[in-house]
Image (cartoon, rainbow, N blue to C red):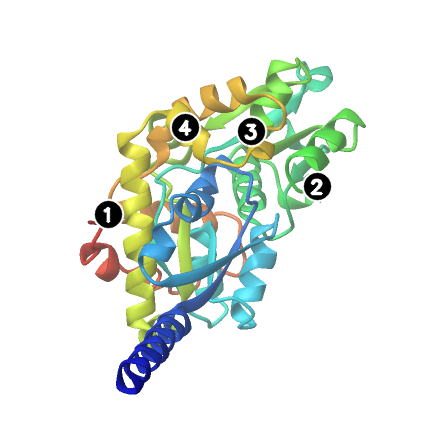
Amino acid sequence: MKHSVLRLMMGALALSTVSHSAFAANDKITLMVGGMEKQIYLPAMLAQRLGYFKEQGLDVELLNEPAGVDAENELIAGSVQGVVGFYDHTIDIQAKGKYLESVVQFSHTPGEVELVATKMADKIKSPADFKGKTLGVTGLGSSTNFLTQYLGVSHGVKLSEMTSLPVGAGNTFIAAMQQGKIDAGMTTEPTISRLVDTGQAKVLIDLRSPENTQKVLGGLYPAASLYMQTQWVQEHKDLTQKLANAFVKTLQYIHTHSAEEITQKMPADYYAGDRAAYVKALAEGKKSFIPDGRMPESGPATVLKVLSAFDQTVKGHSIDLSKTYTTEFVSAAKTQ
């Protein structure tokens, strides 16, 4: 009897030890998202809600940072391990002597729209009319700022002739337009639908579809991605692979499920009070996502061309595009 009790106690202790070890083995990763509620960055929250991070033994914390440039700074400082943001930051930062790389490429279009306030629609009919105007962006040095500046410069407007005003996204962007602080601005869904459907703004430049993106920017423009410091990736290949597994599986889910099914998985407050509009926008925006997370071959060159048109940091510098992204992990991704 004593031996039986002893065996039971030892068995319980062993189970407790295994359970503790399994919990301790969960790898903690912190990712900063450049605007959690934006549909272009939907794969981050969707992966978490589907439980794909946990399947990989990862304990992932998602932090919200509305401006991509601030998320980039947090990554460089080592405060987070990765950023869900625009690929173009990897090129901009390489010109400053630092190396980031896209590990999983979520989309091949910006998913952004340049909106003009309805009351200014007769005065701003193209980016050539940006001269003397105040244009809303999420943050100075952000991807919305990059694209806005390119649109102006490519239509003959000098950087000194237009003003970029950081107004964030969502409610703060909407308020800035309502209050007349900005004449036009670049934003994403669901903010686009909220302003257009209520008649407060009109679409000036649409960068949501591959067709429009190629027409306006001269090629596909890989945008939303998971990017990380190159050195960290090299030192933590196992963790990076697990993240890639989770995100590629999420992209496949997006590709094989309807906008309605995807919306059901998202937090209700992301709908901004209009679920139907969210579903409609997502149904249209789904085509921006890349099912296998692989960088489109022609994409990096298009992004470099765009940045070189106005960004003095990039212009004239030799950029090694092969060091701005990797397909190593998406190629080896295990999604079953």
Point out the tag, 2 or 3, that comes first from the N-terminus: 2
- Per the image, the residue denoted by label 3 is 190
The residue drawn where x is 56% and y is 58% is: 71
Amino acid type, residue under disc 2 in the picture: Val
Point out the tag, 1 or 4, that comes first from the N-terminus: 4
Which element type, helix, strand or loop, lies under badge 4? Answer: helix
Which label was assigned to residue 285? 4
Point out the tag, 4 or 2, that comes first from the N-terminus: 2
Point out the tag, 1 or 3, that comes first from the N-terminus: 3
Point out the tag, 4 or 3, that comes first from the N-terminus: 3
- Per the image, the residue denoted by label 2 is 167
Q: Is residue 184 above or below residue 236?
A: above
- Mark whose residue sits in front, 1 or 2: 2
**How many marks on residues?**
4
Crowding around mark 2 (Cα neighbors within 10 Å: few <14, some 14 to 19, many 20+) is many
Amino acid type, residue under disc 1 in the picture: Glu
Crowding around mark 1 (Cα neighbors within 10 Å: few <14, some 14 to 19, many 20+) is few
Which element type, helix, strand or loop, lies under badge 3? Answer: loop
- Per the image, the residue denoted by label 1 is 297
**Residue 125 shows up from this direction:** no
Q: Is residue 91 above or below residue 25?
A: above
The residue drawn where x is 29% and y is 71% is: 237
- Mark whose residue sits in front, 1 or 4: 4
Amino acid type, residue under disc 3 in the picture: Pro
- Mark whose residue sits in front, 1 or 3: 3
Q: Nearer the viewer, residue 55 or 196?
A: 55
Q: Position of residue 24 (x, y in %)?
A: 41, 74
